[in-house]
Image (cartoon, rainbow, N blue to C red):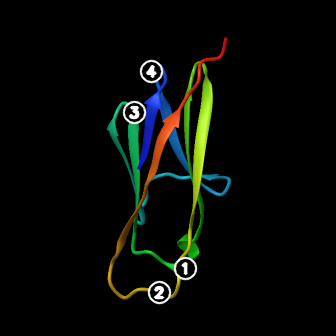
Amino acid sequence: MCTITAGDPPLLIRWFKGNETLAESEKRKIMLLDDTTSMLSLVKLDLEDAGTYTCRANNSAGSVLYSADLRVKGTYSKKPNIILKLLHLEILYVI
């Protein structure tokens, strides 16, 4: 989950894995919960899902990002859901 705690709308929130912009797919769900909160959910986690995930928020004043590493050990026969939680980002004003 990526929550922007300060900054003027409109905000554009994007998710990345490494340098790749993430889009929704069968494995990935990206939900905009409100104007300042986005959630990335990974379904059917596999070893290839390991990596650095980044939430980047932009507005007219600038951008801010936060990254977290996801490590996966082994594979799973069940269907676990993983939600990345990235909290308390601020977009500072550019003067």
As drawn, the residue found furthest toward the top would be 95
Q: Which residue is mark 1?
A: 47
Q: Secondary structure at mark 2?
A: loop
Residue 36, disc:
3
User: Image quadrant for the C terminus?
Assistant: top right
Q: Which residue is mark 4?
A: 9
First of labels 3, 1 by sequence position: 3
First of labels 2, 3 by sequence position: 3
Q: Mark 2 and mark 3: span between their CA atoms?
A: 33 Å
Residue 75, disc:
2
First of labels 4, 2 by sequence position: 4
**Mark 4 nearby-residue class (10 Å; few <14, some 14–19, many ≥20):** few
Q: Are marks 1 and 2 in contact (CB under 8 Å)?
A: yes
Q: Measured from the top left, where is residue 39 in percent x and y?
A: 39, 49
**Mark 1 nearby-residue class (10 Å; few <14, some 14–19, many ≥20):** few
Residue at 39% x, 33% y is 36
The kind of residue on which mark 4 rests is Pro
The kind of residue on which mark 2 rests is Thr
Nearer to us: label 2 or label 3: 3
Q: Secondary structure at mark 4?
A: loop
Q: Are marks 2 and 3 in contact (CB under 8 Å)?
A: no
Vertical side of 91 occupied by 17: above or below:
below
The kind of residue on which mark 1 rests is Leu
